[in-house]
Image: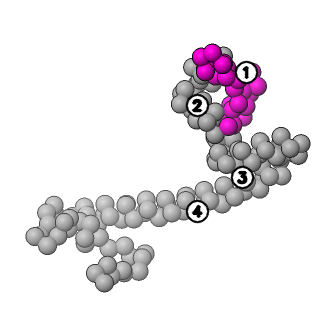
Amino acid sequence: MYVKQLAELMDVTTDTVRYYTRVKLLTPNSSGSNGYHQYSPADQKRLRFILSARQLGFSVKDIQNIINESEQGHCPCPLTRELIAQRLAETEVLFQETLKLRNRMQLALKQWDAKPNGASAEQVCSLIETFVDPNSEEVNYES
């Protein structure tokens, strides 16, 4: 099957298929006469694996490492467990940062509720410039 057929079958874009081919996660046969890639059932199975791994948060590099481990005849499960633990820790940090941002945004809306629109000649936006986050240390940006 060709790029478009594989993409439609797997419900992804042709760019997705081409990208995974370019980074050598998919290895189709190339037709010598027209240069078109021919994807096999093994490529389809590999793409399904890649998409599942991406849904779990594995990076392309992680997936390459897992596949390499498997192709070298080693069980990739210990590596997979290690990588998912790392991705989970990274996700937790991002999640906590996002929660803090959400809280600051909610606080800003509360503070701005009673304030009028407008800025003086020295200000860009009085709302942003007068925002006070009681949870953060005051920073002097004028240095």
Can residue 73 be seen in this snapshot? yes
Q: Which residues are magenta?
A: 24-52
Q: Secondary structure at mark 2?
A: helix
Q: Which residue bears the numbered disc 4?
A: 93
Q: Going by the image, does 29 lie left or right of 71?
A: left
Q: Nearer the viewer, residue 47 or 123?
A: 47
For marks 1 and 4, give the one nearer the viewer: 1
- Mark in front: 4 vs 2: 2
Neighbours of disc 4 within 10 Å: few (<14), some (14-19), many (20+): few
Residue 140: x, y in percent? 33, 82
The tag earlier along the polypeptide, 1 or 4, is 1
User: How many angstroms separate mark 2 from mark 3 (CA)?
Assistant: 26 Å
* Kind of residue indicated by mark 3: Ile
Coloring scheme used: one colour
Q: Choose mark 2 or mark 3, whichever is in front.
A: 2
Q: Within 10 Å of the Cα at label 1, are there few (<14), some (14-19), or many (20+) other Cα atoms?
A: some
Distance of label 4 from label 2 (alpha carbons)? 32 Å
The numbered dot on residue 52 is none
The quadrant in which the N terminus is found is top right
Q: Which residue is mark 1?
A: 40
**What residue sits right under mark 3 in the picture?**
84
Query: Mark 2 belongs to which amino acid?
Result: Arg
Q: Are marks 4 and 2 in contact (CB under 8 Å)?
A: no
Question: Which residue is at a point 60% across and 56% down the rendered structure image?
Answer: 91
Q: Which residue is mark 2?
A: 18
C-alpha distance separating marks 2 and 1 = 14 Å
